[in-house]
Image: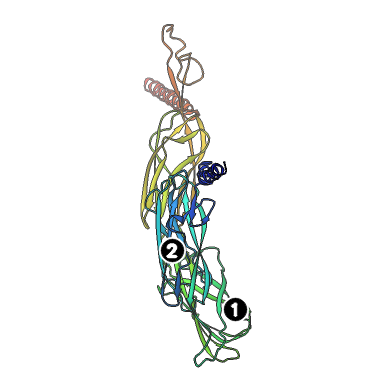
Amino acid sequence: MKKYFVFLLAMLLLLAPAALAAEGDTPMFTSGALTWPIGIDVAAAGGIGAPKGERNKSLTIELPLTNLGNKPLYFVSITPEVTINLETFPFEIKQLDYTTKYNGTLGQGAPWFVSYTFTVANYATRGIKQVNFILSYREEDSLKVEPQTIILPVFVNITRGYSPGGGGGTVRPMPKLIVEKFSLSEDRLFAGENFTLTMYLRNTSTTEGIRNLEINIGDPSGTILPGGSGSGTMFVDAIGKDETIAQEIKLQSAPDADAKAYTLSLSFGYDGATSRQPFTAETTITLRISQRLRVKADDPVSFGEPWVGQPYDLYMNVYNMGKSIVYNCAISVEGPGMSMLEPFFGGNLAPGGTLGADFALMFEQGGFLQGEMVVSYEDVYGELFEQRIPFERFVNEEFYNPDGDFGIDGPAFPDIGMPDMPTRPVRRTGNLTLWLLIGGGAVVLVGGGLTAFFLIRKKRKGNG
């Protein structure tokens, strides 16, 4: 009996994870003994150990991932959380983007092996560091679905790191200088425009101050330069123990800069306040530059007159007058009683390019209608922009007149008896046509009367 109970307990322990995984639609990923809400279980490869590395040498982090959920995942990608803090990213930053994308759909139970090789930074200190990886995925095969993200922590062991000591057995304290954070004077940086970068420099040492700090800042690509006649070199007299100071520099990006992220390199040279020993440090700051979008749209040109229930053809040009690509151009209409016969999508528009748009509208009601033509487009970062062009038309409509007239009040030809004449649909063209008919008739009558008057008068003179 006891053996039977132990057997049942073992079976329950084996089947319980599968039952829980099948309950609901939340994807499951696991990693070794770790399980996250979406769960990546890297357990299949024995879990993620703590890889060991030494300063200035390569270190490889392996991530054997498996989708243990009950649905496939789409647009799966992973990237390390890159920071300038050597305690959370103790590696040299050699590229702007470390994202690795899964090629295709990560099906149920499908494995994915990801490997990263980094170089341990020269100033990375000895000890265990936590490096976070950001996993992103979508639960549907559509970019319109919001991506889901999760943080996967991985620990690395720096066995031989930087030690603030000198030769001959004499230990010299090293004041460690870091860029704790930075801010910009503008919410968005645009090519060719000036901005101010404020860096918050912190001396992390609690035992040694900093003096004679020299800061050199520059962009290896030459896109971001000191603003005006300024210099890329700054000098700070001193920073106390565990003190943070703010340092500003005016910068400017090139007018023809591509819309993307750029890396500023910072190098520090300073002395210990008490030891008088020289030290150096390096770090980077990433800035995102945008190009201002300059899009112009003409007023729509029409062909023919608009009628209720009939396609109304329009044509308009859209011009990209900026220096970067305009993405996902589209045209729509907004207004009561009008709609697009079918959506218009023009795609991407190159700098200096023209998009010729042919499309048709449908009107559900007659009379004077007002609305807006909406030209929408995106920049390289996916931000949506719109231009709205006022649009108005007088829309004609057809109606059935049981009196058989032609859209003018009163019966047609009242002196002619046509009782068997069938009634027919008449197009109402609005007050303008009515007044044109009345005006034309009046001109004919007045002209005929004057002509008759002069002819009779001339004849009488001839007879007299």
Q: Is residue 127 visible?
A: yes
Residue nearer the viewer, 86 or 192: 86
Residue nearer the viewer, 62 or 392: 62
Give the residue type that dot 1 points to: Thr
Residue 425 at what x, y percent from top left? Answer: 43, 18
Kindly identify which numbered label has been placed on residue 260. Answer: 2
Residue nearer the viewer, 189 or 211: 211
- In the figure, 453 relative to 126: above or below? above
**Label 1 CA crowd tier, 10 Å (few <14, some 14–19, many 20+):** some
**Label 2 CA crowd tier, 10 Å (few <14, some 14–19, many 20+):** few
Q: CA distance from mark 1 to mark 2?
A: 32 Å
Name the residue located 55 percent from the left edge and 66 percent from the top edge.
186
Give the residue type that dot 2 points to: Lys
Q: Which residue is mark 1?
A: 204
Residue 139 at what x, y percent from top left? Answer: 47, 46
Give the quarter of the figure containing the C terminus. top left
Give the quarter of the figure containing the N terminus. top right
Residue 214 at what x, y percent from top left? Answer: 52, 84
Question: In the figure, is residue 5 to the left or right of 140?
Answer: right
Disc number lying in front (1 or 2)? 1
Of callouts 1 and 2, the N-terminal one: 1
Question: In the figure, is residue 48 to the left or right of 182?
Answer: left
Find the residue positioned furthest to the front: 1
